[in-house]
Amino acid sequence: MEKLLELLEQDCSMSVAQLAAAAGVSQAEAEQAIRNYEEERVILGYKAIIDWDRVRKETVTALIEVNVVPQSIDGFDRIAERIYQYDEVESMYLMSGSFDLTVIISGRTLREVAQFVSERLAPIQGVTGTATHFILKKYKEKHLVFRPQDPEEREYIFV
């Protein structure tokens, strides 16, 4: 039934009948599997990916690198839980490498994002440093291309 999960991740707007046919199972089996996945919290929710630039909604998205001092028993989990409770936090990941956590947030303005970092995130006990990177343009997210080039916009290179 992993195929059902893959199909849902690609396009959660497919009907159960379409999902069942694509996965090669009966509709009843697909319905039961989806219900089980939802109850077990394998499926956490369903979400549309919106290209907000096409509707002219002004938002600022930032990726914030966060360095922390892990807690003795809980490691990174306690600090992570404190951070992801904020409504501004869209996504958060524990990382390997030169920083510990990646926090992705959105706001209406650069100032709003900067205030979140300076007034809410940086003062948290255990946070030792942050680096904020603003996303300038989204090209692809969750396997979806935001704005494919029109044929007349493509560059042609003649050799």
Image (tube, rainbow, N blue to C red):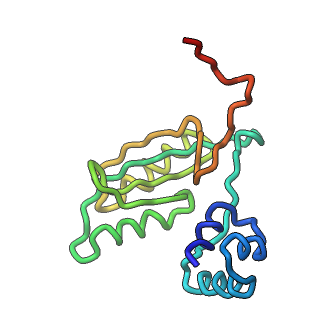
User: Relative to 87, is 69 on the left or the right?
Assistant: left
For this rendering, which residue is in front, 63 or 148? 148
The picture places residue 39, in percent across and down from the top left corner, at 60, 86
At 29% from the left edge and 56% from the top edge, which residue is drawn?
A: 96
Q: Quadrant of residue 82?
A: bottom left
The picture places residue 75, in percent across and down from the top left corner, at 27, 70
User: Relative to 143, is 51 on the left or the right?
Assistant: right
At 59% from the left edge and 44% from the top edge, which residue is drawn?
A: 140
The picture places residue 65, in percent across and down from the top left corner, at 37, 49
Q: Quadrant of residue 80?
A: bottom left
Quadrant of the image containing the C terminus: top right
At 70% from the left edge and 66% from the top edge, which residue is drawn?
A: 12
At 35% from the left edge and 47% from the top edge, which residue is drawn?
A: 130
The picture places residue 40, in percent across and down from the top left corner, at 55, 85
For this rendering, which residue is in front, 108 or 11? 11
Q: Is residue 74 above or below residue 158?
A: below
